Image (cartoon, rainbow, N blue to C red):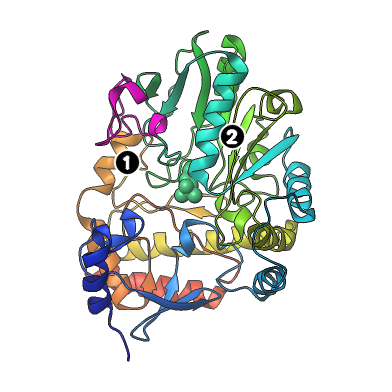
Amino acid sequence: MSHTNVDLFERGKAVMPGGVNSPVRSFASVGGTPYFVDHAEGAHVWDVEGNRYIDYVMSYGPGILGHAHPVVVDAITAAVAEGTSYGAPTLGEVEMAEELVARVPGLEMIRLVSSGTEAAMSAIRLARGATGRDKIVKFAGHYHGHADPLLAAGGSGVANQGLSGCDGVPDGAVADTIVVPWNVVPELDDSIAALAVEPIPANMGLVPAREGFLEELRDACDAAGVLLLFDEVITGFRVARGGATERFGVQPDVWCFGKVIGGGLPVGAYGASREVMGHIAPLGGVYQAGTLSGNPLATAAGLAQLRQLDDEAYTQLERTAIRLADGLTAAFDAAGVAAVVPRVGPLVGLFFTDRQPTDFDEAKAAADNGVYPRFFHGMLERGVALAPGPYEALFPSLAHEDSIIDETIATAAEVAQGL
Ligand SMILES: *Cc1c(COP(=O)(O)O)cnc(C)c1O
């Protein structure tokens, strides 16, 4: 029996909140019915009705080689026949940890977990345990997964302490979280364990740091003995071999990873220097554990993917992103549509406004002006799948060949004319 998207959405909504397992997939912010994916290959996904889309969602980051890359498929297939989880250490975990540590300047030890959320949650615990301090500082509009202490007032650009932005997160859980505006160096003191930052913020649209800002954060942290935490769940192994750390030449004290390192399977990781990681059990008093941590399928997939990511791959990825960003910009200009297409390395954003936002308040004003849903649906109807929400980046992959980018740009030009 063949399925339709509408039927599956109805069935899904009866048994899952919003019909989905992660809110943005529900199309709540763009309206309409989600496409239910049947299968994917390279730069394309096919829905259950047989429609093909050029995919810029790419699972929000893991799919850097494109979907179902043969090297990753083979690695998972080989691993699955050997058993799927043991509760004992494996060669794959050692190799994965060695690969991550070798790539990132300053990173000496790593702990594998099962999601980016778990990585960020554990990294905060580590920072508190290592410093003996309770408070953490995060920037408005930066996303670090959905652990309670990191869900504080993401909705305000104003410094804002002790208010949860989410039902079910008690104010007590965020009482030690301080939210500050992006692109302004916060005041730090000796009550603060960590300053968390997305070095290239890509969860409020793409809102890069101003020139020299990451260096200023490094200095401010050093002056107050605060650990600088780079959440590289998106940027890690995407924006350079050694992530944002290598790209900007600024070393944090603690890192979070996810997405790319799992090759499409559920993985996260957090790491630091040998000294800081010495606080993690069994070496130290910060407890953190996981039944499926370092899972053999996930390490096989992640390693296979990472081993494809050489210098040439990063050059190609960036060239692709430049072609996409320049082409989209030209298409909007030609149609007289006010839009900015920010790009940092291989990451591309899109705001329907005439000036690049520099903080969360500006990003929100640009994202919520009602243009994005119309552009989104115009693209989707013509076979290009963007993220179903205005706060996400576009994720061109190594499978997005020039012809696919050009097809995307031609489609955008047509949709832009109708906006
Ligand atoms: C996706 C993301 C997370 C959360 O990762 P999950 O695997 O979805 O839990 C954390 N930080 C950043 C920067 C992310 O983009």
The quadrant in which residue 401 appears is bottom right
Residue 71 percent location from the top left of the image: 70, 72
Q: Principal SS element in the magenta part?
A: loop
Label 2 crowd bin: few (<14), some (14–19), many (20+), radius 10 Å: some
Q: Nearer the viewer, residue 364 or 151?
A: 151
* Whole-percent x, y for residue 177 in the image: 40, 22
Q: Is residue 102 left or right of residue 405?
A: right
Q: Is residue 264 above or below residue 293?
A: below
Residue denoted by label 1: 363
* Left or right: residue 73 compared with residue 216: right
- Label 1 CB less than 8 angstroms from ligand 1: no
Say what amino acid the circle numbered 1 marks: Ala
Residue 288: image tag: 2
Q: Position of residue 143 (x, y in %)?
A: 42, 40
Q: Which badge, 1 or 2, comes first in the chain's sequence?
A: 2
Depth order, front residue of 294/273: 294
Residue at screen point 33% across, 85% down: 49
Q: Does the magenta portion include 152?
A: yes
